[in-house]
Image (cartoon, helix red, strand yellow):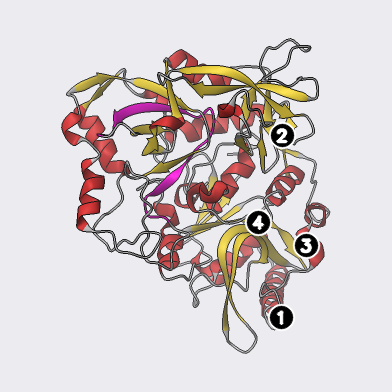
Amino acid sequence: MSTRTGARQGNDLERRAGRRDLVVIRSSRRTLLSAMFAAAALWSCSAIAQDVSSVVPPSGVIGVQEPMLSPGFWIARAQAPESVLMTTEQVAARNQITATRDAALVDLLSLPPTMTRERVLRWIKGAASPLSGPLVDAQGHSLSPQSLAEIQANIGMDRISASEPTRYGMAVRRAQLHTYPTAVRAYASKDATDFESFEAGTLFPGDPVVMVHPSADGKWWLVVSYQGPAWVATVDIAQGDARAVFGYAQKSPFRVVTGDELRTVFTPEAPGLSELQLDMGTRLPLASVPPDQPVNGQGPYASWAVELPVRGDDGALSFKPALLQKARDTSPDYLPLTRTNIIRQAFKFLGERYGWGHAYNTRDCSGFTSDVYRSMGLLLPPNSGAQGKSPGFAHQFFTAADSHDARVQAILNADVGDLIVVPGHVLMLLGKVDGQPYVIQDVPFVIFRDGHGTVHWTKVNEVSVTPLLPLLADGRQGYVDAMTSLVHVTALR
């Protein structure tokens, strides 16, 4: 997941650190006896943290043993791992709150039937990232003022009508979103090429959008998805009526992608549907096809025939069948929301390359957490800042007034799958080992101080399992003390 200016502000810490090639990883009565036990537990965790960081292994990732890289290790330690934490009805009610009350998200169904020039201009501004700072291309060459002016001109401000009927569309493939209508890749420095400055997130096949305004060259459209406004390549979307666009997600029966990412089978007969990437949590209606008739040149009996959106030569939306092997990880419904499934789904991404804003066909810290929960039907905002304060979830907020011990105790009381949010980054709680909390996170670097006081920066650039307490957020402050929010994802409000 990680996702546009404003919506992507929650990941600013990762972006800033990336620019200097150092990504910050990123009962009212108490008896004296119970207080002593609590203090002892906190002391124990501090001691464990110090002990964990005293020996630096060859990997440079402290406190992790080989068994910890298996989901079974953590499932065995989880309390009531198979208990359903939220029913299907509770998930749907939560999603409704998140979709309609979260200021970081856009409720597309509530948009008016006509788009005014003023609204379009606001969305153009909302999509844009600053062009004032120094920017370089992939070769490290500075982008000239002329190049930036051409990018700006391609917005086509003079082509915006006073009003236009609202148009609807759908992503026909995994499509990168941009802050400007350009394929130019821009970076804050030549050492920050994992953090593309015009990157604004990703659409997945079947994602609905409102098509707001075409670029001057016609190669881009400003669209509004549930994530907000951004530019997408024209070839990656198809235009259709509202009934077709919003009805797609309601079709049944369906399959849900539960693997990290799958691909449709190769088919030369339908190149647009051949080896199409489908990420975890993608919902795919089943296509109605005769069981004895080939689909795109291949018999369907060993595959699921799913219905996918396609773009016609005229840009119009239609739907066609494609095959997804039955041997791949899919489910006839969203997975039950259990601790076991949270852990298993998270571990399917273990070792996957970090991808800012879902770049590199992967995902970033908030994309990781949102895709995991998407496979269980639960909607999370697409960036860490919004995840940390979304009104759909129970939170504990922290300020400078909260002590280190109080923060540690809150984490020790948290549940599997809860999210720890620091400025620009989000981590998922896995469980505890010998009283110390461990997390799984999609992160460029892990930072810690060893027993001799030396600060280590280990470049992992992947989904990683780490202890929490020894980790530093910026070379000085620990994650625990940088924590601004603890999100109790499955807590019922």
- Give the mark nearer the N terminus: 4 vs 3: 3
Residue 25 in the image: state x and y as whole percent.
Answer: 53, 66
Instruction: Report, in whole angstroms, how far the alpha carbon at label 1 lies from the one at label 2.
Output: 38 Å
* Residue bounds of the magenta highlight: 196-216
- Give the mark nearer the N terminus: 2 vs 3: 3
Tell me if 212 is positioned left or right of 376 in this view: left
Amino acid carrying mark 1 in the image: Asp
Along the line of sight, the residue nearer the viewer: 22 or 346: 22
Mark 4 or mark 3: which is in front?
A: 3
Along the line of sight, the residue nearer the viewer: 328 or 141: 141
Residue 383 in the image: state x and y as whole percent.
Answer: 47, 48
Q: Are marks 4 and 3 in contact (CB under 8 Å)?
A: no
Q: Residues within 10 Å of mark 4 (few under 14, many from 20)?
A: many
Does residue 22 lie above or below 245 as drawn? below
* 209 falls in the magenta region: yes
Does residue 311 lie above or below 29 as drawn? above
Q: Name the residue under label 3.
A: 68
Determine whether the residue tagged by mark 4 lies in a helix, strand or loop. Answer: strand
Q: Residue furthest bottom?
A: 452
Amino acid carrying mark 2 in the image: Leu
Q: Are marks 1 and 2 in contact (CB under 8 Å)?
A: no
Q: Name the residue under label 2.
A: 335
Does residue 114 lie above or below 121 as drawn? above
Q: Do the residues labelled 2 and 3 touch (CB within 8 Å)?
A: no
Q: Name the residue under label 1.
A: 51
